[in-house]
Image (cartoon, rainbow, N blue to C red):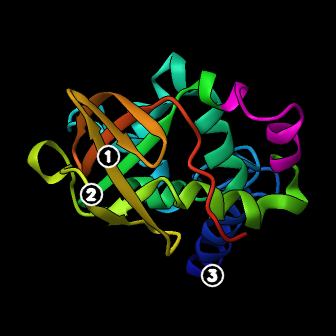
């Protein structure tokens, strides 16, 4: 009888420790609806930063990060890569026709937003000599975008590359325009 009482006490302790008000780490109730899933939610202060972590830490890319979260494609930017991301700065989004960003951020437009954003990512690492004039780069959207050089200036489509940042999973080229895909 004594061992049966101990077993019931142990079971009662287990159930009371994991009551309905408790949440397991990583559950949706512990984090917001827009919390990244999978590798995008890993916190690691020791390793070199990946593309998403760099963008999230940039005051010039808050609109891009909000769009990536709204489209729920964080996982694309944290994959092992290598990736090349052409990251429009906030000014690039501001230059779009009035109301465009607000419309795209609506939940019902998530698929279209994801398509536009994947038009800014290319498998492989493209920088330096690989960004030669006339080269067409295959983007994750399925589109090809042509590289143009004008002196020291490099353009992807009609977006000028303003700067380049290396990441643990590829490279980020900051651009001054949003690369809107030709097919929608």
The spot of residue 94 in percent (x, y) is 72, 25
The spot of residue 144 in percent (x, y) is 43, 68
Residue on which disc 3 sits: 4
Circles 3 and 2, Cβ within 8 Å, touching? The answer is no
Structural distance between the alpha carbons of marks 3 and 2: 79 Å
The spot of residue 6 in percent (x, y) is 59, 71
Structural distance between the alpha carbons of marks 3 and 1: 78 Å
| Residue shown at 70% from the left, 27% from the top | 95
The spot of residue 182 in percent (x, y) is 63, 65
Circles 1 and 2, Cβ within 8 Å, touching? The answer is yes
- Residue 2, quarter of picture: bottom right
| Residue shown at 76% from the left, 50% from the top | 33
User: Is residue 45 left or right of 127 when viewed as pictured?
Assistant: right
Nearer to us in this view, 34 or 104: 104
Mark 3 or mark 2, which is nearer to you? 2
Compared to residue 182, the image places residue 36 above or below, namely above
Structural distance between the alpha carbons of marks 1 and 2: 6 Å
- Residue 86, quarter of picture: top left
State yes or no: residue 99 in magenta.
Answer: yes
- Tag 1's secondary structure? strand
Circle number at residue 148: 1
Can you say which quadrant of the picture contains the C terminus?
bottom right
Q: What stretch is highlighted in magenta?
A: 93-104
- Tag 2's secondary structure? loop
Nearer to us in this view, 53 or 62: 62
Residue on which disc 2 sits: 134
Compared to residue 163, the image places residue 145 above or below, namely below
């Amino acid at each position: 009888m004594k061992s049966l009482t101990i077993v019931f006490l142990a079971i009662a302790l287990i159930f009371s420790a994991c009551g309905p008000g408790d949440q397991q780490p990583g559950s949706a109730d512990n984090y917001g609806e827009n919390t990244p899933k999978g590798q995008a939610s890993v916190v690691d202060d020791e390793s070199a930063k990946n593309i998403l972590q760099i963008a999230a830490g940039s005051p010039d890319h808050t609109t891009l990060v909000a769009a990536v979260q709204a489209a729920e494609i964080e996982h694309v930017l944290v994959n092992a890569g290598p990736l090349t991301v052409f990251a429009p700065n906030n000014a690039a989004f501001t230059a779009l026709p009035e109301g465009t960003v607000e419309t795209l951020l609506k939940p019902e437009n998530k698929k279209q937003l994801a398509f536009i954003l994947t038009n800014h990512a290319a498998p492989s690492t493209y920088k330096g000599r690989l960004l030669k004039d006339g080269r067409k780069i295959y983007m994750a959207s399925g589109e090809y975008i042509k590289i143009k050089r004008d002196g020291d200036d490099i353009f992807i489509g009609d977006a000028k590359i303003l700067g380049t940042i290396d990441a643990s999973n590829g490279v980020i080229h900051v651009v001054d325009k949003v690369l809107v895909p030709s097919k929608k």
